Amino acid sequence: MSARNRELLGLLPASLLIVAGFGAVFLQEQTQLDNLSLTYGAVFLGLCFAAHLIIRVRLPDADPYLLPIVAVLASIGLVVIYRLNETLARDQAQWFVIGLIAFAATIIFLRDYRVLERYRYLIAAGSLVLLLLPRIPGVGQQANGAYLGISLGPVSFQPAEFAKIGIIIFLASYLRDTRALLVSRKRFGITLPRLKHIGPLLLVWGLAMLMLVFIRDLGSSLMFFGGFLAMLYVATDRLIFPVVGFGLFGIGAWFFASTVGHVGDRVSAWQHPFDPKLYEQIGGSYQIAQSLFAQADGGVWGQGFGQALVSVGDSPILPAAQTDLIYAVIVNELGLIGGIALLLIYVLLIERGFRIAVLARDSFSKLLATGLTTVVALQVFVIVGGVTKVIPLTGVTLPFVSYGGSSIVANFVIVALLLLISDRARREARR
Amino acid sequence: MNKPIIRVFAVLLVLFGLLAYFTTRWTVIDRAALQDNPQNKRELLAQQRIARGTIVADGGTVLARSIRRGDGTYARRYPANGLFAQTVGYSFLNPGTAGLERFYNGQLTGRTAGLEGTLRKLQGKRQQGNDLRTSLDPQSQQIAIDQLAGRPGAVVALDPRNGRVKVMASIPSYDPNVLRSAKATTVLNSAPGAPLLNRTTAGLYPPGSTFKVVTAAAALDSGLYEPSSTVNGANGVEISGVPLNNDGGQNFGEIDLTTALTQSVNTVWAQVGERVGKRRMSRYMERFGFGSPVPVDLPADERLASGLYCSPNGKRQLAAPTDGCVDIGRTSIGQDKLLATPLQMAMVASAVANRGILMRPAIATRTVDPEGRTAYENTPQQYSRVMSPATAEKLTAMMQKVVQEGTGTAAALTGIDVAGKTGTAERDVINNITQPWFIAFAPASDPQIAIAITIEKTVGGFGGTDAAPIAKAVMESLLR
């Protein structure tokens, strides 16, 4: 069977999920919802097949499983959001349309993605500007003490979602050039590169620390820096880099946790979620405590679709259920089984990403695929880890599942890039 | 470059394993602890969406029901207002649940419906609670409250044959409907006289001479004494090295136990108690229910154990009657370190009334599911065998004398034999503050009602003059 036919077949589970999921929610909430809402499901399925056709025409050799996996994740997200709030589901469906346009544009206009290397400094500079935008008065927005969003008229988005792609492109390109130089010098038996080679990398570390101070978001910072270290390690094959890197990050994080109020609050809320004082405090541990309570109610099998207690009357019980806490909602309704299943789908996605990196022929493609995949994986880890109290809870989205326009669009661009890399790699491999 | 890529993948797999482990931790390993966390209001919040069952009195009077609100949630209303306030309890988001509402929460929310509940869920039907039927008698309860006339105190009446509770009045009371507002809850929590406290099961008082019934049961049942056995009732007999006085300093000569009970002679019963001894007293007290939280279908934190409360290191705690701190002579006349709940003293009367067999007190009779079928039957249970039927018969005769010609004549009913025992515990000798008691059962020949009454504080009042008339009024209503 050809790759594209396998992809088409692979969309079957997503189709079943979306039909069954919407059907279940529809039956549960029949009294409040009208038939029209079922059309969102149909629209979503249409989008999946449109994406399939674009790939069929432009990237006939690309990985056949990436799109079906993403479709399954997106359909889970859409059904859960639909169950939480019909209006949000409609918005989310619209964001999928925009995401698909970005996806198609990336595939059509970036046929040879290696041209990106030429603009690496421009991309890096642009990404830095995007990252710091939320701190500019007038456009920046503060939420829960972190500066993550900006608003331009009616549209508000999170520039960090796009900046992460730009920074990975820059790093992939930069590391391809310097990877040999980074490991060329040895002193006292360990790899010790010259300052002029390691300088830009120290700059990235500084940047991550700066993000902690300026954006005040430990989660995003961990995600960026983790992705960077993974790429550095893959580029050099020297364990010393990530070890020293994490050490530096740990020291920096500890320092800022004890000096920057917002970061410190998050850490103490993480350590003592049931402390009455932190629990009552605004921006305290209420959210993480409620997340754990909701998961406990889920048990092994969950309470069933549409059964999660999200609000009573008009008062919310699970704050930010459709974004930060969507994993808690899923565990509450689908139980441990549902949560593990979702994590396994992400593992499949990550496995495809790394397979593409392994198959790719040139260093830039390998590094780019590694970086993109690692950042998506770390984003899942940061938010699910936050919701399950592995690490302090910070507000990043669960890729493809959480409600949020910037996240959807950016993640579709990532998938498009991975498909581009995969198409080239598999075509070259076949020759 | 492929090896490090695979290693990065491996590290990420470990991180995802960590996520899976933590999800397992919250959903399985720590599940119970999280659900019991006092900050976890999910259960209560979820219950706002369930139509709780109604709680009804014997005869169908609605004591608690749920009304549907605009947003699809339900709110609790108490149509009988404060009539059975502490017994029925309440169920609100804040301050939570209490009383029968709490004890039968599973039944009232329909959670324990098992397979049938799952089937209902699959059919998309809303979870609905079971109705709770009780043996409570609203009319007699009202009479008890009227008789207490605002004086802090308690009245408990139950059927000695099966333990069904009929009256459970605790004054001061409150209207549970006001607990809807958080402010009213704060006010009630610190209100003088503690209206939220169920005095019948959690009020601990010195039982005074009503406890002589326990001493008499031990004395007769152990075979050491007969009702006709005589003991010298002189005033000022030394008990544990300290002279003990009779009421009013009265001197009695050699009198039999029937007379000693009728006239409530302290010195006689203290001597009897000393001869019966700590170990025997301990055994009989235990059979009557002393030493354990009073056994009734109310939440554990609303029930206290009657018994001997010693303070070995400044902290009051329950001690065995055999403990060194106990003066068994004074304990035998209901003084010293002895404290009892009104329900416990009603159980004492009940055990004598039911020919020595103590039935476990019970408020609820059964629960009924939305289809009208019995979901749970609270069948009468024997608590213990306290004394032989012969002993009970002898003791009944003695207690009848108390009402016929002794201290309890105010409880006498026309045409019905009443058996009872008065008590007057001294609370403040200097200011002459007393706590009157009365325990009784009727009809003596075929007991249907056992009752205990206490008024926390009177100036110079007696069990016979202050508590016995209340017993008369309530028993009259219950036997009608």
Image: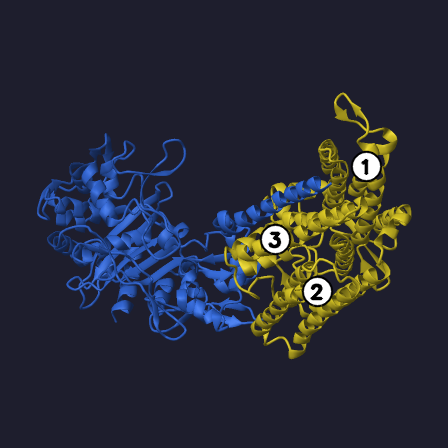
Disc 1 vs disc 2: Cβ atoms closer than 8 Å? no
Q: Tell me which amino acid carries mark 3.
A: Leu
Q: Are marks 2 and 3 on the same chain?
A: yes
Mark 3 is surrounded, within 10 Å at the Cα level, by few (under 14), some (14 to 19) or many (20 or more) other residues, namely: many
- Disc 2 secondary structure class: helix
Q: Say which of A127 and B178 sits in front.
A: A127
Q: Is residue B384 above or below residue A175?
A: below
Residue at the location (57% across, 53% down)? A340
Which chain is home to disc 2? Answer: A
- Disc 1 secondary structure class: helix
| Mark 1 → mark 2, Cα distance in angstroms | 36 Å
Q: Reading the chain from its start, which is encountered first: label 2 or label 3?
A: 2
**Chain letter, yellow in picture:** A
Which chain is home to disc 3? Answer: A
Residue under label 3: A343
Q: Is residue A44 above or below residue B335?
A: below
Position of B460 with respect to A74 (left or right) is: left
Position of A110 with respect to A233 (left or right) is: right
Q: Are marks 3 and 1 on the same chain?
A: yes
- Disc 3 secondary structure class: helix
Q: Colour of chain B?
A: blue
Residue under label 1: A179
Nearest-to-viewer mark from 2 and 3: 2
Q: Say which of B369 and A353 sits in front.
A: A353
Residue A346 visible here: yes
Residue at the location (66% across, 48% down)? A381
Q: Is residue A410 above or below residue A169?
A: below
Q: Is residue B286 above or below residue A412?
A: above
Q: Position of residue A217 (x, y in %)?
A: 75, 45
Nearest-to-viewer mark from 1 and 2: 2
| Mark 3 → mark 1, Cα distance in angstroms | 33 Å
